[in-house]
């Protein structure tokens, strides 16, 4: 059972709920979020009924959740959650674009990338400073210097940054450098110790789908983060492994409506790692927006042939601008709008949509 506390519930009200659960012989799990505290009763729930708690001070609601994932289930939270990143809402009517290179390389590369994605209408910038590479001999990322280059380039255009955390020992550095969104990559989706640690901080997390993870495993991974008290989670579908070898991964478009039904968390899509080729990105991104994605994570590089990582799938700046125009029309057709564009129409100045 989960007991949803009122936003202003004090410690004594929380303690009273805990005692009531313990008195029935169940275990307690408290998830203290920034907005409210959620208390889980773990054990034989048949002994509990909602009215045992709903009469206690500070309790908003108590309910049995059938699903194995609890805090992230739509079952208790009918409204879609809005995750705000420095005031930018992810999960609302506007579809957000997060764009930038696969990896942070050099200062000129990052400055050019930031200018291009901001001009195209992206509201957040991505860039990996710690890269999970298949080969130990491949470029592993620019590290802490890379974080600084990303922050600096993005700040010139007022863009919050998204970057991947692979090693829990780097979490303090991420906090010190004020990373705005921590990305957990596909290879770490079930790194439970890492999930527990990002569950303890108050920084939004993009949780990418494990390349062979079921929806249920993915939502249980999100539950780990929520259980620690970090409720600011964004799910990112990035393609899954199948028998098909003609493209890098298979974009699971079906996951979008399924997740929208199962969870109140925002859902974004990474068409770049799904297809693995730049020419596929427009079709996959359009499909994602049409299917209800709340945002996109797209790789853009000022000069893709020279990219140090994932060169085949990076869009050039003009390709990115064209993609944003197309997505504005797709979003409008499904009753949404691309953020960075006004009332569904990209604002044009000399042919370039301007971020509002
Ligand atoms: C990335 O976004 O740079 C990345 C490595 O993605 P994924 O974890 O989905 O492979
Ligand atoms: Mn990449």
Image: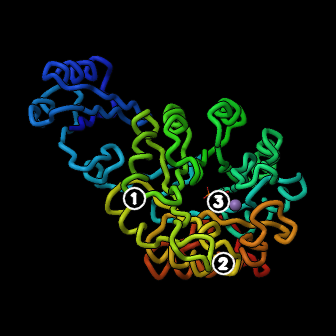
**Ligand 2 sits in quadrant:** bottom right
| Label 2 secondary element | helix
In space, the residues marked 3 and 1 are separated at their CA atoms by 28 Å
Model colouring: rainbow
Q: Nearer the viewer, residue 64 or 161?
A: 64
Mark closer to the chain start, 3 or 1: 3
Q: Earlier in the sequence, mark 1 or mark 2?
A: 1
Q: CA distance from mark 1 to mark 2?
A: 28 Å
Q: Is residue 265 above or below residue 44?
A: below
Q: Secondary structure at mark 1?
A: helix
Q: Residues within 10 Å of mark 1 (few under 14, many from 20)?
A: some
- Looking at the image, is mark 3 or mark 1 nearer the viewer? 1
Residue 215 numbered mark, or none: 1
Q: Quadrant of residue 56?
A: top left
Local crowd size for mark 3, using a 10 Å CA cut-off: few (<14), some (14–19), many (≥20): many
Q: Position of residue 326 (x, y in %)?
A: 61, 82
* Rendering coords of residue 268 (x, y %): 52, 62
Residue drawn at (39%, 36%) of the image = 227
Residue at 24 percent across and 25 percent down: it is 27
- The residue under label 3 is 123
Mark 2, residue position: 323
Q: In the image shown, does 1 or 180 lie closer to the viewer?
A: 1
Nearer to us of marks 1 and 2 is 1
* Disc 3 + disc 1, Cβ < 8 Å: no
Judge left or right: residue 351 versus residue 238. Answer: right
Q: Residue at x 28, y 47 (%)?
A: 68
Of residues 351 and 169, the one nearer the viewer is 169
């Amino acid at each position: 059972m989960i007991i949803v506390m009122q936003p202003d519930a004090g410690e004594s009200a929380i303690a009273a709920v805990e005692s009531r659960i313990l008195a029935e012989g169940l275990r307690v799990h408290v998830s203290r979020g920034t907005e409210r505290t959620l208390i889980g009763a773990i054990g034989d729930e048949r002994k509990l009924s909602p009215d045992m708690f709903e009469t206690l001070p500070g309790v908003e609601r108590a309910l049995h959740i059938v699903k194995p994932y609890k805090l992230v289930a739509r079952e208790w939270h009918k409204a879609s959650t809005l995750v705000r990143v420095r005031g930018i809402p992810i999960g609302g009517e506007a579809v957000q674009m997060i764009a930038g290179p696969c990896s942070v390389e050099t200062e000129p590369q990052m400055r050019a990338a930031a200018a291009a994605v901001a001009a195209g209408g992206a509201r957040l910038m991505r860039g990996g400073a710690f890269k999970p590479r298949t080969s130990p001999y491949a470029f592993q990322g620019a590290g802490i210097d890379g974080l600084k280059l990303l922050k600096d380039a993005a700040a010139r255009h007022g863009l919050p940054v998204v970057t991947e955390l692979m090693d829990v020992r780097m979490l303090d550095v991420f906090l010190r450098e004020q990373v705005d969104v921590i990305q957990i990559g596909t290879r770490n989706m079930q790194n439970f110790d890492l999930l527990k640690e990002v569950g303890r901080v108050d920084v939004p997390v993009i949780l990418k789908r494990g390349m062979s993870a079921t929806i249920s495993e993915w939502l249980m991974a999100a539950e780990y983060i929520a259980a620690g008290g970090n409720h600011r989670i964004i799910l990112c579908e990035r393609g899954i492994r199948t028998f098909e070898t003609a493209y890098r991964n298979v974009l699971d478009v079906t996951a979008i409506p399924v997740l929208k039904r199962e969870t109140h968390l925002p859902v974004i899509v990474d068409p770049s790692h799904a297809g693995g080729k730049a020419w596929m990105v427009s079709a996959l991104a359009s499909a994602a927006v049409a299917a209800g994605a709340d945002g996109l994570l797209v790789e853009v590089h000022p000069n893709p042939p020279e990219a140090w990582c994932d060169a085949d799938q990076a869009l050039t700046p003009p390709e990115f601008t064209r993609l944003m125009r197309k997505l504005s029309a797709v979003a409008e057709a499904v009753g949404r709008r691309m953020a960075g564009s006004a009332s569904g129409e990209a604002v044009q100045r000399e042919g370039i949509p301007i971020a509002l």
